[in-house]
Image (tube, rainbow, N blue to C red):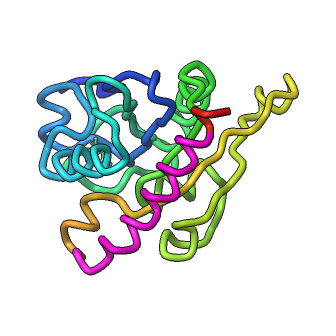
Amino acid sequence: MNTVFADGDPSGGVMFLGEAPGADEDRQGLPFVGVSGQLLDRMIEWIGLERDKNAYISNIIFWRPPGNREPSSAEIAICRPFVERHIELAAPRVLVFLGGPSAKTMLQKSEGITRLRGRWFDYRTAGMQARDEAPIAAMPTFHPAYLLRSPQHKREAWRDLLAIKARLDTAADA
Ligand code: URA
């Protein structure tokens, strides 16, 4: 129904990248407005930010895959250059990849989210590399929809968020 591009404001220094819009997001044209969005809002509050004021949210796919199926590799490939340019323009200090598809696509890794989460990666698009720009600190963590299904993993997500908060606080002081 709608293109779902982004919500929030990148001035807080952090950009969250999810997977693809669901039915609620498609209806409203905004990312993360359904139940997993409510948990994402709480995760954003845990790190002392507010969605409308200083957190920035987008996805690696801008349209809802029919029937909520997983995005195909062709759909991911079509959106990817726009996602990369979006990151370059938003220029966050910290990038958070929510869930395996986002982390694996953007970091070009084959490992699953359980192995990738909680680790810092240097993220640089080809354009940033060509311009010799500094990489962005990027951390994968669990997707809020996964945390709703498997709440026992909230402890690890909380640890990831604390590391993200510490990084943002350090970057803000620098
Ligand atoms: N899940 C996502 O990955 N993105 C959304 O926008 C909503 C749910």
Where is residue 35 shown, x and y percent of the image? 13, 51
Name the quadrant containing residue 99. bottom left
Where is residue 100 shown, x and y percent of the image? 46, 62
Foreground residue among 108 and 34: 34
Foreground residue among 14 and 125: 14
* Furthest residue toward front: 173
2 up-or-down from 174: above or below: above
Foreground residue among 167 and 173: 173
Q: Which residues are magenta?
A: 151-170
Left/right of residue 43 with respect to residue 159 in the rendered view: left
Where is residue 163 shown, x and y percent of the image? 52, 58
Instruction: Tell me what residue is drawn at x 61 percent, y 64 percent.
Output: 119
Left/right of residue 76 with respect to residue 36 in the rendered view: right
Quadrant of the frame with the N terminus: top left
The prevailing secondary structure element of the residues shown in magenta is: helix
Where is residue 114 shown, x and y percent of the image? 49, 75
Instruction: Tell me what residue is drawn at x 45 percent, y 24 percent.
Output: 10
